[in-house]
Image (tube, coloured by chain):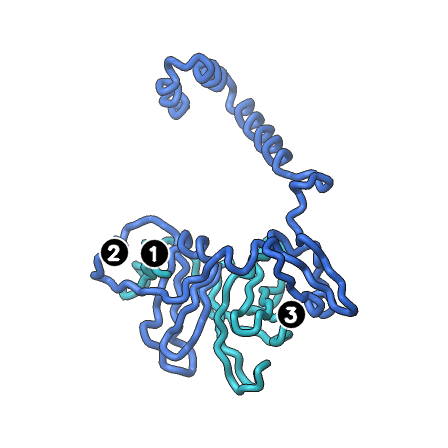
């Protein structure tokens, strides 16, 4: 599932801080054919639960916290470009 | 049946292909449709793995119980505590699959964005799939809020850790 999620935890965090920014990555696991993500900072597991919006922390220090999902569109480049002439595009050589 | 005539001309010189395409050409449209459906069923059936086969075991290398905690071990030996996922969300340890390890699919951590006019910026009519997003409706000002990512690049990395202005986001596939 292609989607855009927040990486920001608001309020009291697992480390006791007020806000934190997560670095998300693939955990190497899938669950029911969907990738399970994890964050570098706490190794919490994040998953897009069926029927829920956004990512839910299913295990780890951030358990039950959610990361907001933002609106995004999967479409053909030519269509996207026609609708958004000034769009920036990620360089495929990015690392 | 024009397409088959073209392909048959390509197949000239290969007896097997000639027979196949001659047969297709003589089929009625109904026969051809039936054959395609049957072929698809055969292919799909062959893809469904026998659960008793060792190859079908894509689940965790090990499921470990220590006191009240449940862990799943991936192929690198790393243990993941999934106790909360099981108890709170009713997930099943055996349904966690592949377990390739956290370094198997590396995210893009420093995405470089191209702007119109840049050398490698795609032509307007290029034909490929993208995920596009416009993040300009939040409460904070966002810079360069309209961006797009080729799906093929997302499939290779699964995650792009991005920053739109002050907003930190993950573009996921």
Instruction: Say whether residue B158 is left or right of residue A80.
Output: right
Instruction: Say which label, 3 or 1, has the lower sequence index.
Output: 3
| Disc 2 from disc 1: Cα separation | 9 Å
Image location (x, y in percent) of residue B18: 43, 14
What element does badge 1 sit on? loop
Who is closer to the viewer here, A67 or A62? A62
Read off the residue under disc 2. B120
Q: Tell me what hue chain B is rendered in.
A: blue
Image location (x, y in percent) of residue A13: 57, 82
Q: Do dots 2 and 1 share one subunit? A: no
Read off the residue under disc 3. A59
Q: Residue at coordinates 65% horizontally, 56% vertically from top-left?
A: B96
Q: Do dots 3 and 2 share one subunit? A: no
Q: Residues within 10 Å of mark 3 (few under 14, many from 20)?
A: many
Image location (x, y in percent) of residue B62: 70, 55
| Disc 3 from disc 2: Cα separation | 41 Å
Q: Tell me what hue chain A is rendered in.
A: cyan
- Residues at circles 2 and 1 in contact by the CB criterion of under 8 Å: yes
Residue furthest to the right in view is B67
What element does badge 2 sit on? loop
């Amino acid at each position: 599932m292609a989607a855009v999620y927040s990486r920001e935890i608001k309020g009291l965090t697992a480390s006791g801080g007020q806000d934190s920014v997560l670095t998300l990555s693939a955990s190497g696991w899938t669950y029911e054919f969907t990738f399970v993500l994890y964050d570098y900072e706490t190794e919490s597991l994040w998953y897009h639960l069926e029927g829920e919006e956004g990512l839910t922390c299913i295990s780890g220090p951030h358990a039950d916290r959610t990361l907001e999902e933002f609106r995004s569109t999967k479409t053909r480049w030519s269509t996207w470009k026609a609708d958004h002439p000034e769009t920036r595009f990620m360089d495929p050589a990015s690392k | 049946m024009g397409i088959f005539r073209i392909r048959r001309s390509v197949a000239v010189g290969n007896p097997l292909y000639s027979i196949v395409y001659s047969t297709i050409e003589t089929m009625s449209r109904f026969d051809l449709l039936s054959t395609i459906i049957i072929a698809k069923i055969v292919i799909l059936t062959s893809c469904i793995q026998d659960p008793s086969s060792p190859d079908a075991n894509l689940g965790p290398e090990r499921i470990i119980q220590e006191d009240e905690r449940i862990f799943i071990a991936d192929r690198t030996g790393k243990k993941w505590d999934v106790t909360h996922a099981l108890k709170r969300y009713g997930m099943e340890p055996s349904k966690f699959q592949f377990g390739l390890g956290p370094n198997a699919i590396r995210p893009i951590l420093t995405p470089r964005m191209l702007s119109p006019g840049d050398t490698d910026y795609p032509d307007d009519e290029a034909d490929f799939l993208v995920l596009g997003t416009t993040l300009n409706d939040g409460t904070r000002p966002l810079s360069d809020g309209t961006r797009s990512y080729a799906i093929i690049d997302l499939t290779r990395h699964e995650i792009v850790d991005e920053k739109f202005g002050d907003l930190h986001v993950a573009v996921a596939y």
